[in-house]
Amino acid sequence: MPKASSAWLLALLLCSCGSPQFTTPPRAAPPLPSAQASAGPVDELDRPLPLDARLKKGTLDNGLTYYILPHKKPENRAQIWLAVNAGAVLEDDDQRGLAHFVEHMGFNGTKRFPKQALVDFVEKSGVRFGPDLNAYTSFDETVYMLQVPTDKPDLLNRGLSVLRDWADGVSFDPGEVEKERGVVLEEWRLGRGAGMRLFDKQAPVFFHGSKYAERIVIGKPEIIKNASRDTLVRFYQDWYRPDLMAVVAVGDFTTADIEARIKSEFSSLKPPAKPRPRATVTLPAHDNTLVSIETDPEMPTTSVRIMSKLPARSEKSARDYRRMLSERLFNAMLNGRLDELRRLPDAPFLSAGSSSSMFLRHADVFQQSATVKDDGVERGFGALLEEVLRVERHGFTSSELDRARSQLLRQYQHAVAQRDKLDARSFASEIVRNFLREETMPGPEAELALAERFLPTFSLDEINQLSKTLGKGSRVIAVTGPSRMVKPTSDAMIAMSRDVASRDIKPYEDAAPSGPLMAQKPAPGPVVKTSTVSEINVTEWTLKNGVRVIVKPTTFSNDEVKLTAFSPGGTSLVKDADYDSAKFADEIVAMGGLGPFDAIKLRKSLAGKVASVSARISELEEGFSGHAAPADIELLLQMVNLSFTAPRRDENAFASWRTRETESVRNRRLSPDRTFFEDMLLFSTQNHLRRRPTTPEVLQKVDLDKVMAIYKDRFADAGDFTFVLVGNIELDRLKPLVETYLGSLPTKGRKESWRDINVAWPNGVQTKTIVKGTEPKSRVTLTFHGAERWTRDTDNDLRMLAEVLRIRLREILREDMGGVYGVTVGGAITRRPKQEFTFNVSFGCSPENVDKLEKAIFDEVKVVQEKGIGDDYIVKVKELRRRAHETDLKDNGYWTRELERAYRFGDDPRQIVDITPLLDKVNSDHVRAAAKKYITTKQYVLGVLKPENAGAAAP
């Protein structure tokens, strides 16, 4: 099951070696403490839950733990991970930041993979550095992650060799250590900003009295810059040892085969003769409420957080699992109430939420948080407290509990239905949590059985009591915001707590929806034409009203159907005077609900269902995006129908929306990155009216009457709409539903197309420097552009050039120069409104290195233009594209996007399946020609963000 975690803390504290594309999956909300029998036999509820029967867990003689789970999603792939029960909290005083530095060195030379040979090997195997090869370090752990193909046995063997080298064979080559210092410092630099500065101030409060406050993962730049190789190696030798490690293997293999390989590779791993004790670091309790109120001139939002820190609770038994379910029900119901409050025209906060989650390895947290107006801290804080007290005094209602039960049970049913279709990565993450945190892992079927057993047994009184129990931990009140925030005092916040406690708080009244979403089915419109593309199992229906429906049944996901739809027009057909209203029309109408239900009742009516649809009005199209479980396809299509025929006008929802958006955009440009993005967009489009940033003044021009008129006009005629549905679909069951809900849609016989609003890149070489921010960091974006006709060949040429330069620039800018943490390279050819290409390179760096790195890019491009690229790189980029395409062809989302593209432009959809002819053409000459064609020193846009203090100290 999906698990809850303190995402805000993870985002600040996790440090990874590659591009930051992997997020540690969340974890189960921890259970509540309960009275245990002091003597006698162990109660059945207190016995540890068994591991998933399909999971093999073992321990080698040297103490290393291993887990094996056969799983065929994706096919011919395996996730092989190394989990190390050691992180930043174990660093000595002279090692702050070196746990993470050690992790980096695992990618810079090992016993069997010297220098960059490891990355070279995986890229030739079709594995991408970042998404498929990565690692992260946190307070208490370091985890290395590698995906390898399994259709070639040698690749799996070599992948396990990589893990073994990570375990005891990292070289720490002196030259590589020196180069990697720069990369780690650039990662430190990339993370600097208002959020991290505020966290630095508040960490001593969050981690009061604990070593955690002094062991922030990224560490101290002066130590990163100056630590000796021996100091790095000391951490590695102390903590990288078999008793603190687990090998995790999840993928398309047999248990016996992979177990034999693991034993062969890891049995010779030697444990240390005198292992250093692995200390358990705890978070001391405190009786007094700690208050931290901090501001930063670049912080674009104001937020308030109420934390109740608790000792970590056990997650091993059925009783533990029942407690976890109770917390999930509690937070789901409280979040429903907070969502209703934020939708009020004069809401006390802009957004809010409640959660129970892991805080640290040995600490959990129950917390409520909210974003508020700059002058609304005390009001928002009081509203959060009041809602918790409302539950404590009056409890939840039976209708709320029924909905929460239904929704939670449906999540467990979905997990079972998807069990063999979930990506192996999700299971590998869960196994890592079992090893590091002893989180139970009985398997989806067993978890569903537990949910079915326990959910009906919860009384309202039992759930209501949680507001008292969970809130009795060590309390912290944390407030952050911009310098302009109306800053309360700590005493004022404590006084507000007392004031709320003295209020006469009324019970909550649940306005439950009555009746169905669609009371009467519309008269169907028949399918008048059917055609098929048998090679890819696609059926096309044309309905009497002109609606075209493209359907592809798949077995890629058992509990999923994806929907998309498009029609030409969009905001391009709206005159400039109405553009501000048009730009937000889809968003505002969605806030009003659908058919008979406002947004709140609509959410309640969907409890226990899996169906969602969003209307969109983009610049050149209007359309829909949605998804549903197969059992809820009819509901999905009803929602589409009502989005055409019964959009709701809601004055209160509109007022609430405008308040939230105004507050959001008011401070948006306090962020240097946001300022850079907005200014470069405007500069690159020559100050086009429709690329100007949203301001409070713009939002005041948005008119609800115009919003409704524009929305209704864009969806007044379904006759030129194309719908694409992909997933677990039975055609015979779908067809009458399509005829009923899409065949009945209104048509007017309009023949529309989009309009070119003449957004154009500037000619020649254009450069812009934007000065914003206090941290010693810059951002650089370099975009080449020009006219180009889209064909499969030109599209592939640009893609392959981007792949080649992504690898080469990473090697040069990161690995050789140590000047960046990551570099982004991408190219695309647009087909509407103009046929033109863009090719972009962007990165962050020290301000003093901007010119040097920019020159290095142009120097490498010149080399490629003159000499082409080595055969090794051609092998890599072709294999990367081929392996990615293998996986894409088993993904509903990929097919939805590709079919939408094919039918939008009239391409042959059969070409989706075979890219071999394209890849066969790729060689060094091809790449050289593409570099000459798409990259020129005569036409590009260069943007540079520099800090306000030109002499800002850099580490």
Image (cartoon, rainbow, N blue to C red):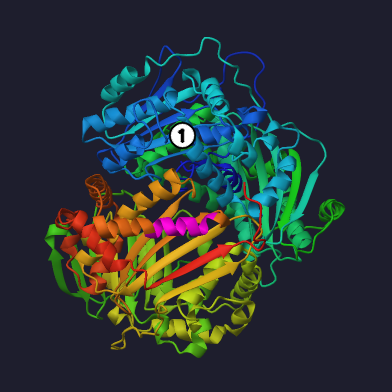
Which residue is at a point 46% across and 34% down the rendered structure image?
175
Residue 825 left/right relative to 368: left
Residue 854 lies within the magenta run: yes
Residue 186 left/right relative to 662: left
Which residue is at a point 69% across and 35% down the rendered structure image?
214
Query: What range of the chain is rendered magenta?
Result: 849-858
Q: Position of residue 1 (x, y in %)?
A: 46, 41
Q: Residue pushed farthest top?
A: 273
Q: Which residue is mark 1?
A: 175
Q: Position of residue 564 (x, y in %)?
A: 34, 66
In the rendered view, tell whether residue 119 sits above or below residue 399: above
Q: Position of residue 677 (x, y in %)?
A: 52, 67
In the rendered view, tell whether residue 183 sits above or below residue 37: below
Q: State the SS at label 1.
A: helix
- The amino acid marked with disc number 1 is Gly
Residue 866 lies within the magenta run: no
Which residue is at a point 24% across and 59% down the rendered structure image?
928
Q: How many marks?
A: 1
- Front-lying residue, 339 or 938: 938
Q: Position of residue 708 (x, y in %)?
A: 50, 83
For residue 745, which quarter of the picture? bottom left
- Front-lying residue, 100 or 841: 841
Residue 430 visible to the viewer: no
